[in-house]
Amino acid sequence: MFVSENSSTNEAYELAVRFLARREHSRHELRVKLRQRGVSSSAVESVLDTLETNGLQSDDRYTEICVRSRLRKGHGPLKIRAYLQHHGVQNSKISEHLSSNEEYWFKRALESDTKCRVRNQIEQENARDQEVLQVRARYLSNRGYPANVISRVLNSPA
């Protein structure tokens, strides 16, 4: 649905509510979607402020949901942070919801490494081969784990 440039704020509000009915959106995502549909900048900001005031849109809630979802998928802090930044969430909100505890991420990376070894049928005695270490490191890196955590996982007794 395209909204004409002179359309009312009510139409833009209803459009935004329909977006939010499908799934949670960040403020930035809603701004982009409304602008793509021809809503004026002033109307967009007015609608976003109203949605936030009414509790229908919250970047905190969006961040919390995304972090939980990405953790279930086995993603690390770097990948989660990049995803949220791409969707316009402020760094301060991201930091509030991401644990900075290295031990927590080490345990999560160990779980992901175990899944990698099972998926790739890596035997215990082969887990230290250079080629296998590279596969494991690349897997964890692609999942968004920092280098220091990956190093600890690869050096830990399997």
Image (spheres, grey):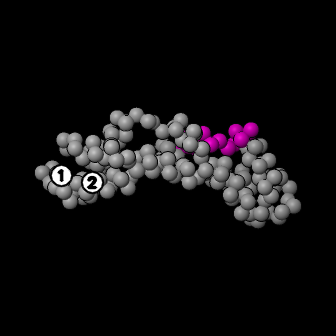
Task: Please state which amino acid type lies under the numbered disc 2.
Answer: Arg
User: What amino acid is labelled 1 in the image?
Assistant: Ala
Residue 114 seen in this snapshot: yes
Disc 2: which residue: 136
Taking 139 as reference, is 98 above or below it?
above
Q: Residues within 10 Å of mark 1 (few under 14, many from 20)?
A: some
Quadrant position of residue 7: bottom right
The residues bearing labels 2 and 1 have C-alpha atoms spaced at a distance of 9 Å
How many numbered marks have been drawn onto this rendered protein structure? 2
Q: Are marks 2 and 1 in contact (CB under 8 Å)?
A: yes
| Circle 1 SS class | loop
**Residue shown at 44% from the left, 45% from the top:** 77
Residue at (40, 50) in percent of width and height: 144
Q: Which mark is residue 127?
A: 1
* Residue 32 versus residue 64 in the image, above or below: below
Q: Where are the magenta residues, as a range? A: 52-65
Q: Which mark is residue 47?
A: none
Q: Earlier in the sequence, mark 2 or mark 1?
A: 1
| Residue positioned most to the left | 125
Quadrant assignment for the C terminus: top left
Q: Nearer the viewer, residue 134 or 1?
A: 134
The image quadrant where one finds the N terminus is bottom right
Number of other residues with Cα within 10 Å of mark 2, as a class: few under 14, some 14 to 19, many 20 or more: many
**Looking at the image, can residue 72 be seen?**
no
The percent position of residue 152, horizontal first and vertical second, equals 27, 42
- At x 87%, y 61%, the residue is 6
Q: Residue at left 54%, top 49%?
A: 84
Give the structural element (helix, strand or loop) at label 2.
Answer: helix
Q: Position of residue 96 (x, y in %)?
A: 53, 35
Main SS, magenta region, reads helix
**Spot occupied by residue 70 in the image (x, y as percentages of width and height):** 46, 48
The question of residue 137 being in magenta is answered with: no
